[in-house]
Image (tube, helix red, strand yellow):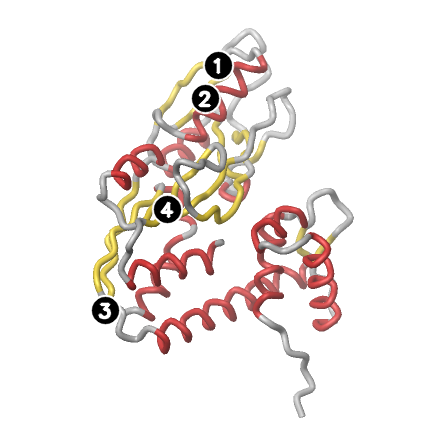
Amino acid sequence: MNRFPDIDTLSLRIFIALSETGNFTQAAERINRTQSAISQQIKKLEEDIGKILFDRSQRNIKLTSDGELFFGYAQKILEVRQELFSRFKEPEVQGEIKFGTPEDFATLYLPEVLSAFAASHPMVMLNVECDLTMHLIDKFNRGDYDLVVIKQLKVNEKNKGTTMWIEHLDWVSSARVNLDNKNKFLPLVLSPAPCVYRKRALEALDKAGIKWRIVYTSPSFAGTVAAVKAGLGITVLPRKMIPDSLSGIRKKNLPDLHETYITLLQKKSASPAVNSFAEYIISHLG
């Protein structure tokens, strides 16, 4: 007789969504369930595990130490499940996939996903290219890509796709950046135009009446982080992408930044290989 309770994959997906968003409302939007259903599912999961997985004492919900441990197991279970069904339902899927993605997204989110997909679909060739969102959209519309991950300022009816999650942006600095001199321009380290984060930053500063100057431009995530770490200026990054060497700025009278939307665009009449890859990305990252 099994003395352990059964845990369904929906509960695991809800747990991961809440872990990544830190908010019941956003987790509900991602999973397409009501907020009350999300709350009840998490409560049942904690009862089944016998541990408190989330610290609800703060405005943003955070994982407890037990929750952090459970997070790794939940990810592994969902990955193995996806690999199993992909391997046995579609063992003969083959072909070539042309995939476009922002560079920071490819660096931080995609390596494990691409590796796992390749392992379960050995007959599929993946061609991945990194670029800025606006360039990715242009190339996608020209037919250069089968699917792309893009960052949007809002859910765009013109670029219909699957919104995988919402990014919350923060001003990011290092201990070497001096922000106390009010007579100077605010030094900025940003990607070149067109860039969604750049647009968010400049619009917010202009609206707040804060003088700014772009002192360093880099198209790469690594280049941006290096420049901020060296003390050249501050930048804007998604909260979950802030490296340990930098920190979010919670004061200095800087304006709040609106969120961005991470969306997957897929061409119509796609091949079985492209459809499989799109489903794989959404199930692992959405």
Q: Residue at x 73, y 42 (%)?
A: 59
Dot 1 surroundings within 10 Å: few (below 14), some, or many (20 or more)?
Answer: some
Q: Amino acid at mark 1?
A: Trp
Q: Are marks 3 and 4 in contact (CB under 8 Å)?
A: no
Work out how far the residue at label 3 is from the one at label 4, CA to CA, in angstroms: 23 Å
Pointer 2: what residue?
Answer: 188
Mark closer to the chain start, 3 or 4:
3
Q: Amino acid at mark 3?
A: Met
Decide which of 139, 79 is in the foreground and name it.
139
Pointer 3: what residue?
Answer: 123
Q: Is residue 131 above or below residue 198?
A: below
Pointer 4: what residue?
Answer: 265
Q: Amino acid at mark 2?
A: Leu
Mark closer to the chain start, 1 or 4:
1
Dot 2 surroundings within 10 Å: few (below 14), some, or many (20 or more)?
Answer: many
Q: Residue at x 64, y 20 (%)?
A: 253
226 left or right, relative to 59: left
